[in-house]
Image (cartoon, helix red, strand yellow):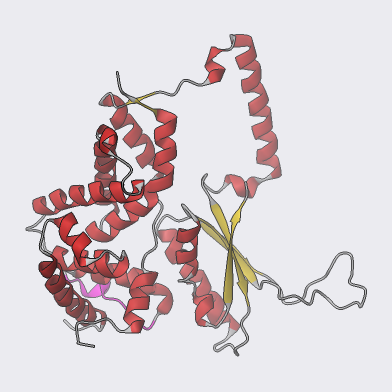
């Protein structure tokens, strides 16, 4: 086990950074069980490649980059899955206290490309350049996806079919 | 602004959606186990392991006794998973409040249930309007400084997450203020 990391040190790192990255993955993939699997894979890769972390960015940023790589691979495998529009899951915007659940439901109904555009840009605050780098697309593609995503999100939010 | 731009209301709505749910508690152990199996993690060597068995046994007994005392004296804290906790102190605002108190209570309770359903430990209570100072103030008037009307205790990874969570509380919609403070424990 030469080169193995110390468990306590890892648990401290885990406690500090997991919730934020897990939250991002939940918003992207929709299902907590998938987010858990991706979070575990993220940590496996992070620990394996910890020596490559040079401290040029914050550790959270580096870990988020790995998580987005894992997500990108996951999405390729699930590219043929389409969200199901279940009328029972449509939001009722008038009930403000249910707003967060309603947003999650509307996001879950969007195709992956549109969901990740809204999550990364409008919720997480990534720039188009950062999204382009993370998802290996052009910044212009990110912008056009966001436009379509916002229109789709708005229509769904207003209950349009 | 084009149709593709967000309105201020939409922007706020999406910003409020940025709540980080607590990961499943089993995930940490699962991840540690997966790392161990791949030879990427080794068990920590604790100084206690080096001392003689009788001393270690004594320590374990002492720790057990202390745990029992803590369980008896603080059953509420044992109910919440370990991790940073924050208190959200709810202060009344200056604007007149709309709706009935029961409606607001239901809305606050629903909000807390929504948070809890995402795996975030949360509890809270409403506080009565009257307050009594001990010892009584010299002029016999109760505390003149604004007093909280209620509170929530929530577990969050850090202060920023707790603040984001507080920003979604319906109390703000009724013109109230929320002060977030970390619980030192």
Is residue A150 visible in the rendered image? The answer is yes
| Closest to the observer, A8 or B74 | A8
B127 relative position to B179: left or right: right
Magenta stretch, main secondary structure, is loop
B79 relative position to A85: left or right: right
Q: Position of residue B95 (x, y in %)?
A: 59, 89
Query: Is A88 included in the stretch rendered in magenta?
Result: yes
| Closest to the observer, B153 or A148 | A148
Instruction: Residue at 26% x, 65% y: name it.
Output: A119
Is residue B23 visible in the rendered image? The answer is no
Which quadrant does the N terminus of chain B fall into? bottom left
Instruction: Residue at 33% x, 30% y: name it.
Output: B33
B104 relative position to A124: left or right: right
- Residue B63's quadrant in the figure? top right
Q: Which residues are magenta?
A: A85-94
- Residue B48's quadrant in the figure? top right
Q: Position of residue B148 (x, y in %)?
A: 67, 71
Farthest residue in the left direction? A80
Q: Is residue A32 above or below residue A94?
A: above
Query: Is B82 included in the stretch rendered in magenta?
Result: no
Farthest residue in the right direction? B138
- Residue A45's quadrant in the figure? top left
Q: Position of residue B161 (x, y in %)?
A: 45, 59
Instruction: Residue at 68% x, 28% y: name it.
Output: B65
Q: How many marks?
A: 0
Q: Position of residue B174 (x, y in %)?
A: 54, 83
B133 relative position to B174: left or right: right
């Amino acid at each position: 086990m030469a080169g193995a990391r110390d468990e306590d040190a890892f648990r401290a790192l885990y406690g500090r950074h997991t919730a934020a990255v897990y939250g991002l993955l939940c918003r992207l993939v929709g299902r907590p069980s998938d987010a858990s699997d991706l979070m575990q894979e993220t940590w496996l890769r992070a620990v394996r490649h910890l020596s490559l972390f040079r401290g040029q960015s914050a550790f959270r940023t580096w870990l988020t980059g790995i998580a987005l790589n894992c997500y990108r691979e996951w999405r390729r495998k699930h590219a043929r899955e389409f969200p199901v529009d279940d009328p029972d899951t449509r939001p009722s915007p008038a009930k403000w206290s249910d707003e967060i659940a309603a947003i999650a439901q509307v996001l879950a109904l969007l195709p992956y490309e549109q969901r990740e555009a809204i999550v990364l840009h409008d919720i997480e605050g990534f720039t188009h350049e950062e999204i382009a780098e993370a998802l290996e697309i052009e910044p212009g593609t990110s912008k056009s996806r966001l436009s379509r995503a916002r229109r789709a999100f708005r229509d769904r939010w207003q209950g349009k079919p | 602004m084009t149709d593709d731009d967000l309105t201020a209301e939409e922007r706020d709505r999406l910003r409020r959606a940025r709540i980080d749910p607590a990961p499943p508690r089993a995930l940490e152990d699962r991840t540690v186990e997966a790392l161990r199996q791949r030879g990427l993690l080794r068990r920590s060597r604790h100084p206690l392991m080096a001392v003689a068995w009788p001393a270690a046994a004594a320590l374990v007994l002492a720790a057990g006794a202390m745990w029992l005392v803590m369980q008896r004296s603080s059953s509420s804290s044992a109910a919440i998973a370990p991790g940073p906790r924050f208190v959200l102190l709810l202060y009344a605002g200056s604007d007149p409040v709309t709706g009935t108190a029961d409606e607001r209570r239901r809305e606050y309770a629903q909000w807390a249930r929504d948070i809890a359903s995402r795996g975030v430990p949360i509890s809270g209570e409403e506080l009565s309007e009257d307050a009594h100072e001990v010892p009584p103030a010299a002029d016999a008037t109760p505390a003149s400084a604004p007093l909280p009307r209620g509170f929530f205790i929530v577990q969050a990874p850090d202060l920023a997450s707790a603040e984001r969570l507080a920003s979604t509380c319906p109390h703000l919609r009724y013109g109230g203020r929320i002060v977030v403070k970390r619980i030192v424990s």
